[in-house]
Amino acid sequence: MKIGILTGGGDCPGLNPAIRAVVKKSVKLGHQAVGFRDGWKGLIELNYKDLDSEAVSGILHLGGTILGTSRTNPFAKEGGSQKVIENIKKAGIDVLVAIGGDDTLGVAHKLYGLGINTIGIPKTIDNDLSATDFTFGFDSAVNIVMNALDNLHSTAESHHRVLVVEVMGRHAGWIATYGGLAGGADHILIPEKPFTTDEVCDSINRRHDRGKTFSIIVVAEGAVLSESEKVMTKGAKTDAFGHVMLGGIGKFLCEEIEKRTGFETRDVVLGHLQRGGSPTAYDRILATRYGIAAVDLIQKKDFGKMVALRGNQIVAVSLEEGIKRAKTVDMDLYEIAQTFFG
Ligand code: F6P
């Protein structure tokens, strides 16, 4: 069979290990693999390259994606989906492996409905797909946040400052919760739990009343102020999937905390640092297992599926189930984090 591979949406550590696994296993089974450049854009423009074992050698430890990525949505472009289908046929692709988050997998699901054989592999640093326990990229991002918090502790303590650390997490605060727990945050704010500036200041004041002279606050970019019930954005521009660019909640909080508590406060935006660098061992192994499982599905001609992690087992779910619901933070876990607030 001729297998097409693409990576779509925001990049994350683990994409290369997944590509490597799909290609190496496919080649071993006598299939041919090609990689489309820059996500769905490569299919619209028929831009692809052959991927043999040599092409994916030495990429296991590399961040990003050797195929490139984009947030192209063929269904949002005039004639885009027809072009994709036409080009799949032109390139002689028998099955397409789409590695991405809900947007990329949503396109794969729609194409499957239009008669194209697709398989999905879930990735995103946000870990917000409900059909799988974990997406790869998440563990690497959490480790980056944890290391940043470790570093920020010493400077916050030396200067007796409050540090507000803004992390990614659009609708789900998984990175903030896991990163904050691992890095010992003194307060964590997530999209799932609207908050007031007063409650954050009270928490900081309680800590300082106990004799502490510094605090670290972790806030997800999508955290919602209950006063305004709005997320903070960088303008109204949206991407091809209708997402606005988030950001600004850290800066806002920084100014408000300093004004209301009198403690010197600084803000740090971790931004795309969270998506870069080498994948952790956990993400390399998860991505590899997903890649192998995707090829197992191809062998069985079991298309329209997404590989997923349930417990420690890799299973297959329908793409429809894979994208159905966003997975938000488990409140039991957030309660554990709350034990350490204030
Ligand atoms: O891929 C998901 C994500 O990392 C979100 O957490 C974040 O809001 C977004 O991507 C940022 O996207 P971009 O790379 O387009 O700035």
Image (cartoon, rainbow, N blue to C red):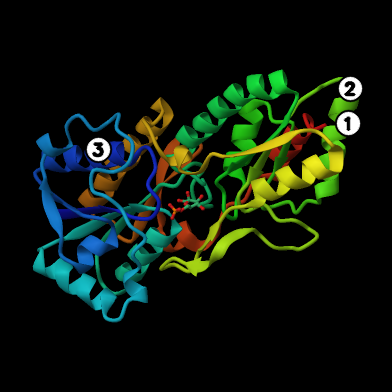
Give the residue pinned by disc 2. 210
Residue 199 at what x, y percent from top left? 84, 45
Pointer 1 local density, CA inside 10 Å: few below 14, some 14–19, many at least 20: some
Q: CA distance from mark 2 to mark 3?
A: 52 Å
Q: CA distance from mark 2 to mark 1?
A: 6 Å
Residue 112, image quadrant: bottom left
- Residue found at the very far right of the displayed protein: 209
Foreground disc of the pair 2, 3:
2
Amino acid at the residue labelled 3? Ala
Amino acid at the residue labelled 2? Arg
Q: Nearer the viewer, residue 293 or 258?
A: 258
Q: Earlier in the sequence, mark 1 or mark 3?
A: 3
Pointer 3 local density, CA inside 10 Å: few below 14, some 14–19, many at least 20: many
Residue 170 at what x, y percent from top left? 57, 54
Tally the numbered discs.
Answer: 3
Q: Is residue 124 left or right of residue 236?
A: left
Q: Earlier in the sequence, mark 2 or mark 3?
A: 3
Q: With respect to residue 176, does 321 lie above or below?
A: below
Residue 108 at what x, y percent from top left? 33, 63
